[in-house]
Amino acid sequence: MRHLMSPLDFSTGELDNLFSLAEDIERHPEKYAHACEGKKLATCFYEPSTRTRLSFEAAMLNLGGKVLGFSDANSSSAAKGESVSDTIRVISCFADICAMRHPKEGAPMVAASHSSIPVINAGDGGHQHPTQTLTDLLTIRAIKGRLDSFTIGLCGDLKFGRTVHSLINALVRYDNINFVFISPDELTIPEYIIETLRERGIPFREIRKLEEVMPELDILYMTRVQKERFFNEEDYVRLKDYYILNKEKMQLAKEDMIVLHPLPRVNEISVEVDDDPRAVYFRQVQYGVYVRMALLLTLLEIRIP
Amino acid sequence: MLNVGKIEEGFVLDHIQAGKSLSIYKHLGLDKLDCTVAIIKNARSAKMEKKDILKVECDINTLNLDILSFIDHNITVNVIKNSEIVQKLPLSLPKEIKNVIRCKNPRCITSIEQELPHIFVLTDEKKEIYRCKYCEEKYGNTGF
């Protein structure tokens, strides 16, 4: 029995199989419509995350399975002081697989070590959110046709952005990837990631203005620059426009460049960009469902010929 | 020079960094043992100039080698029988340490579930980096 705690739990070979399955699901959804009949997914969300929970539930329903669960700690026995390990032992009697989100880092790992059903980490504090990374990777692979040999720009809050760190850690396993980090001084990529890239001889650059690199990028991964991360309002007002993607900046980009965003978006991508075919962030949400379907099938060891 | 006599049976921890013996005494729980313990501070050493030594007259099995390795794997452990060194135990960094240090990350699951063991895993042997098994927080300066 396998669990998913981190995007690095799967080798690149295993990820290839997972993504091939997800792409087959995209092409032939009818083939998988009854694949999980009689199976139940428990969504144990100790903190609200509507998008991730609904994506998991949609994935299981698309496979013909059923879902049960709770969507915040107050409606679970955690409010009465039950430990994660006790909860998962109980949930193991109700469901065949569990997706768990918890505000405390490592909680899904504790659950996995006491569980008799596969556990998927659906986000644990600022630590890991592996299905977001799998979604990002599948979106890139499905649209660009590969997970190697490209220049990717990561823009916005690179200091605190969990999705960005996780994506970089996943991408360093592929060949010929060139990273460009676009952020204000206050929100630069952490030193430990820079060290990893240096140790592996992976090319990267750190710049301050998005316009400077737009023509070079094959992929632009946008994240939100939150006002509260700045020391003062003046800096925020001065810098925020460098990190807002609009039509003018898109005109500088390659015709086949794609824009990803983990969502929710606030104002870092102007709505006028939404109609640009290169803006794939809503397709990315759809790929999130496909990759979760593939993941449920893989962890439940269900094979559809 | 001060002389401390030989012990009959037990173990001698040699090449302890000068000034660290009391801390090691505490972390190994030697204060709880009902046996003779000699703490020698600032002994002359050809290799280290100054060193500390601990002589403990009890069964070697009472010693937690994992804790000792984690604190300082350069310490020499001599097993004594009939007042002679019969074995030198090699120390290497333990792959995993349980309930020796505590995770200080307030966002870690161990911060709210008290019964969970605090487990740290050796993630980089060269840089001697340990990370919490649950939240992967790096363990900072040991302070030993």
Image (cartoon, rainbow, N blue to C red):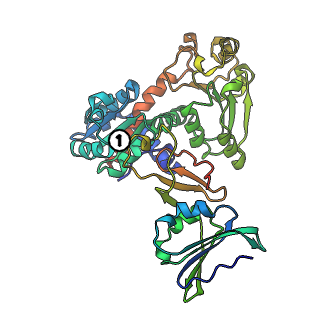
The reply, left or right, for residue A112 in relation to residue B15 is: left
In this orientation, which residue lies closer to the viewer: B34 or B19?
B34
The reply, left or right, for residue A198 in relation to residue B110 is: right
Give the x, y percent position of residue A215: 72, 24
Identify the residue shown where x is 57% and y is 14%: A273
Q: What residue type is labelled 1?
A: Leu
Give the x, y percent position of residue A49: 39, 26
The reply, left or right, for residue B76 in relation to residue A114 is: right
Identify the residue shown where x is 57% and y is 53%: B130
Q: Is residue B54 above or below residue B70?
A: below
In this orientation, which residue lies closer to the viewer: A200 or A76?
A76
In this orientation, which residue lies closer to the viewer: A168 or B45?
B45
Residue A147 visible from this viewpoint: yes
Q: Is residue A276 above or below residue A59?
A: above
Pointer 1: what residue?
A: A296
Q: Is mark 1 on a helix, strand or loop?
A: helix
Give the x, y percent position of residue A140: 55, 33
Q: Label 1 lies in what chain?
A: A
Give the x, y percent position of residue A35: 28, 41
In this orientation, which residue lies closer to the viewer: B30 or A220?
B30
Where residue A143 sits, quadrant-wise, is top right
